[in-house]
Amino acid sequence: MALPQIKQDATDARLAALEMPQGGWSQAAREDALSRVRSMGLPGARDEYWKYTRPDTLVQPDAPQAALLETDEAPIFGEVDRLKIVFVDGVFSAEESDDLAMDHVNIDRLADASDIHWAKDVYGVLEARGQTPVQRPLAALNTAFATDGLLIHVTGKAPKPISLIYRHASETSDAILHHVVKVDSGAELTLLENGPAAARFNKCMEVEIADGGVFHHIRAQGRDHERRAVTGIFTRLGEESVFKSFTLTANGVLTRNECVIELTGDNAVAHVAGACVGDGDFHHDDTVFITHDALNCESRQVFKKVLRNGATGVFQGKILVKEGAQKTDGYQISQSLLLDEDSQFLAKPELEIYADDVACSHGSTSGAIDEEGLFYLRSRGIEEGPATDLLTIAFLAEAVMEIEDESLQDEINGRVEAWLSRRRG
Amino acid sequence: MLEIKNLHVQLEEEDKQILKGVNLTVEAGKVHAIMGPNGSGKSTLSYVLSGKDGYEVTDGEATLDGEDILDMEPEERAAAGMFLAFQYPVEIPGVGNMTFLRTAVNAQRKARGEEEMSASEFLKVIRAKAKDLKIDADMLKRPVNVGFSGGEKKRNEILQMAMLEPKMCILDETDSGLDVDAMKLVADGVNALRDEGRGFLVITHYQRLLDHIKPDVVHIMADGRIIKTGGPELALEVENNGYADILAEVA
């Protein structure tokens, strides 16, 4: 079926501005992805899946300019013992990165991986699976045109986290990064990510977790006010495997974080959580799709948003329980704390269930600061500002506590506190 | 210490007068009790004194050590030495009890220009005080009042009082929802804080609590006024005869 003209034009214009990297093992996957983009077309304002978030600035040929944030705040995760890998405007920086060698983990660059590569079983494969039942053309665009990224093969328990740092250096940078992570049976990795990456950032990460594999992901998206980002995580979980992802978003004019999870092995566990704090020109969208396709799996979605001065939060979260996925335990909560009447939260929770022995719950709320709680704290001598902050951090706690490592929870809370105290001046 | 003169208060949202000229003086080192039937304005008095929104003072004044407190923010009153033990302590999910208390203690110290308490010093002090109130480490770690039983919540209020060391303590129906043992524990906690520099205003429906916290003065409040003041025997009179006689007497 032909695309609507407006979509066709927008897609053509975007594709004309891009150049596909040539040769190597990923060529076929890239060509396939390009044909997916051509048949789907890039997202437009009329698409149902983009009803609450305008995709135009993510689709237009050039990245809108984004000023660099000037801050003397030390970058997050600085105290963590980690393997550091730095990208500047989406380009790997060998100079600033640690040596890419670590026990039980093989790390290659997407840009220079050799001809025969394990990643071809994953690259573009999980993304392509994630295109049904809902289309995600910007992820396919990423697979086709990604210029850099990492191929991480985890063969055992990684001795320390891998920490990806995305520096933003140019006001007009437009970065497309694609990572592939393969966690072998019984292997374990914690992946940290932080930084704004670029003026406009399209990131895709495919994570294949074999039976008994464990993958933890903790991310803090950069605070540059004008940056834009569309990110996609595509993961498939084997038997008794664990996937846990948490994202903190503070600032950024536009963020769309998609997470597509497929539970294909029995007794697998997938948690995805997000805390965001937005002030003013801030639009944050969490879009999650979890498919239960095995017995006795558990999934949790916990998303909390603090919004003020006209900021907008969006949540689209779906749990699909396929026929036969008995004993599914699905939980979904999305809540916003609106600090004034100008801010808004749009939520679309969905459940689609084809098995009869499952427990799925979902809830969504929007509210203001609890006046009773505020008075209680103030009556104990805590000033209104700090008391409000304390209640705000408390509001985010359920999401932050999805991070297993308590010291990383503290890191995230520290960032939220700093953000709040800056707002109070 | 606490001086209330001709205090008139109405609700902000509706034109309803709750306090109609309360006069009351609590001296340092003394325990005053206020008893009275439901709807007499006891809890309103405690909220107005601690600065809760929703009430409008239309006449009169309230001072703490000569300082007008009615124009102060709740946190300023707290720093000045006012403390309200809530009838219904508020649950605050996500804020650890210990974090809350340390933030409160140091906020008050800071407001008074005193040095903040170090983490280790705070820990030492709170452990000792918690032990007296049979509050275990788990309760200190848990979010404020979340999942606490009625008795635990009230003990937690007294722990806060003990940590904050206020000059003027108002206890709003601290006995409600407590069994006999829990009441004894709470009363012991309060009695341990009795001190010649500290005043207490104990609001209660029942004489029971006053068996444990012996008052110096008992006031009867009805329809927004203190209608009778006497010694501890007044509480016994209420216990035996109810409020009807007293109400009839002043009518």
Image (cartoon, coloured by chain):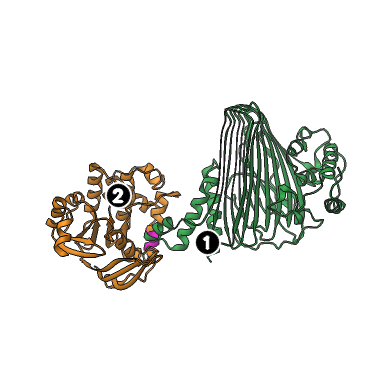
Chain colours: A green, B orange
A374 on left or right of B49 = right
Q: Is residue A121 magenta?
A: no
Kind of residue at disc 1: Ser
Say if A167 sits above or below A180 in the image.
Answer: below
Measuring from the top left, give residue B82's x and y in whole percent.
31, 63
Seen at 23% across and 61% down, the residue is B222
- The boundaries of the magenta stretch are B105-109
Residue receiving disc 2 = B129
Q: Position of residue B47 (x, y in %)?
A: 33, 61
Q: Which mark is residue A421?
A: 1
- On screen, B1 above or below A360? below
Residue at the extreme left: B233
Task: Judge by depth and name the residue closer to the eye, B90 or B124.
Answer: B90
- Residue A107 is left or right of residue A337, and the answer is right
Q: Chain of mark 1?
A: A
Task: Tell me: B29 left or right of A136.
Answer: left
Identify the main secondary structure in magenta: helix
Identify the amino acid type marked 2: Lys
Q: Secondary structure at mark 1?
A: helix
Residue A388 shows in the view: yes
Which quadrant, please, contains the N terminus of chain A? top right
Could you say where residue A346 lies in the image, as x and y percent from the top left?
Answer: 62, 52
- SS of the residue under disc 2: helix
